[in-house]
Structure formats: C-alpha cells, structure tokens
Image (cartoon, helix red, strand yellow):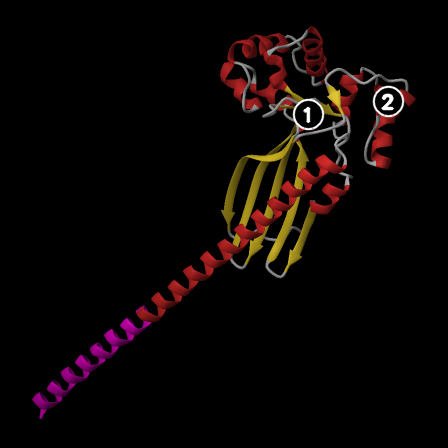
Amino acid sequence: MIARDAQGGVVLVNVLVVLAIAGGLMLLLVSSQEAAFDRVARAADAAVVEQIAMGAEASVVDALRRDLDDAPETDHLAEPWAQGVIQDEVSLPTGRFSVRVTDLQAKFDINQMAEPSAGLLDFLRRLLLALDQPPETANQISRIMRVVGQIARLDDLSTFGVAPETLAAMAPHVTALPIAGTVNLNTVDPLLLRVMLQNRSHAAQLIRTRESRGFLTLDDLRSVGAQRPQNSGFTSNAYRVDILAEAGTAAIEMQTILTRRNARGVQAVDILERQFTYDTPIPPSN
C-alpha cells in the first residue's frame, strides 16, 4: 500500500512538473509575442516622429525659399515666413511638438579673421574688452586663422591654444559661419550691437525700436544719429532649426543647419547638416 502511494506521489510530481514546463513555455511564448508587438509599436512610433520632424524641416525650407521672392531685402523672425513655421511647444494627439529657428548671423563670424582687416581686428579687441577678456587674444586668433583658414566651430580654436574661458565668454556673441555673412542688425544681441556702434545710447534706442516693431531699417539708424557699422546688414542666409516631436513611446530632437543662395539667378535653400537624437518621451516641464 505504501509503495503504491509512493508511486502515485511520483506520478503526481511528474504531472506537476510537466504542467509547470508547459505553463512556462506558454508564458515564454506570450512574453515573446508581447515583446515582438512592443518592438513593432516602438518602431512604428519612431517612424512617426521622424516623419513629423522631416515634415517640419521641409516647411522651414519652403518658407525660407519663398522669402527670397517675397522679401529679399530684410530678414527677421517677425516676418510672415518665420511666424508661419516657428512653433512654441504644444501638445498634439501624438505628443509634444515644437519648432525653433535661430538666425546664425545674429553673431559675429570668426571666420572673417582668416583674412582680417584693421577694422575687424579692432572690433574683436573691443568685443573681448567688453567681455572682460584679454584684448591681445584678438591678435592670437588672427595669427592662428591666417594659417589654418576657416574653422567649423568656435571651440576649434582651443586646439591652437586659445583659452577655454575666453571662448566660453565669446560663444554667446561669436560663431563660425558655414558661409560668408554679415551680422544681421535685426537679430544681433544688445551687447554685440553696443560694441559695433561704439555708442551705448544709440544701441539702446535701436533695441527699443526693434523690440516694439520687430526689425530695424537704415532710416532707424539715421534717426538716432548712427551709421551702419562695418560688417553689418539686415539679411541672413544661415539658420539653425531645432525640432522636437513625440509619438507614443518615441521622441526625436532634430537639429538642421540651413543655408540660402540668392545670387546670379540661383535661389535655393541647402541642408548643410542634420543631426538626430532619439529618446524616450521627455517629461513635460512644470
């Protein structure tokens, strides 16, 4: 009797083991199927956010191209083209979305120091003084760039011995443009404008006019008794576009550098550089 009970217990254990294995296999199959569905869903979300970002970029490219026909004499972010494509962060059914456009010609182009004039060298010295940096660094930068030529980024100068703290101080006001261009008086920051005009009062009056109307004209400079500074203008042909898009479990941040050509009958917008950063959705800001 005891042997029979023991045998029955063994059979029961075997049955339980078989059921456990079967259950584990079923769980594994279900988990694998869920994981496959999850991967497909994530891939679909990633494709959606990329298409949203690419579509937003295309809208900016089209707007900048049309602006060459509609208003080639001036560029500022209060123009219809800019108001039509710039989008503050909003919540869409897919998730968050925003488009920011930055005028790269709002800053001084350090690449001009590859062939510096006396006026440019003097300007860079004055800017360094305004930033509490050694003015003699202007001569150092000039010597470097006469040898190496144009650079891709301002930080590249650190390789040749320019102090990192000086480059950090310059960064809000100085850039390395991918194309030749003057400083746009419609977007230049107040400190850089003061250095360019060498007159704090004139700069303050012009900034007030620009803030109230959105742009400046040559008549505005004349009205305050100022002349248009060397290396300045009212147009821009280099922009950075920053796009954020979310959909489901996917998010993308895309940065594009755009340049325009408007000479000799050729009007075009070129995509010079494009960078993607994929991530999980970013928590909303408070």
Label the magenta part by its dominant secondary structure.
helix
**Percent x, y of residue 146:** 56, 9
Closest to the camera, between mark 2 and mark 1, is 2
Q: Residue at x 74, y 32 (%)?
A: 72
Instruction: Inspect the magenta stretch and tell me whether residue 3 lies in it.
Output: yes
Image position of 143 with respect to 221: above or below:
above
Image position of 198 with respect to 59: above or below:
above
**Percent x, y of residue 200:** 84, 19
> Tag on residue 107?
1
Task: Name which residue type carries label 2.
Answer: Leu
Task: Name which residue type carries label 1.
Answer: Lys
In this picture, which residue range is highlighted in magenta? Answer: 1-28
Q: Secondary structure at mark 1?
A: loop
The answer to which of 240 and 285 lies nearer the viewer is 240
- Horizontal placement of 250 versus 76: left or right? left
Q: Residue at x 34, y 66 (%)?
A: 32
Of the residues under marks 2 and 1, which one precedes in the sequence? 1
Identify the residue position indicated by label 2 in the image.
221
Structural crowding at the residue carrying mark 1, measured as other residues with C-alpha within 10 Å and reported as few (<14), some (14–19) or many (≥20) = many
Q: Secondary structure at mark 2?
A: helix
Q: Quadrant of residue 202?
A: top right
**Percent x, y of residue 213:** 85, 36
Structural crowding at the residue carrying mark 2, measured as other residues with C-alpha within 10 Å and reported as few (<14), some (14–19) or many (≥20) = some
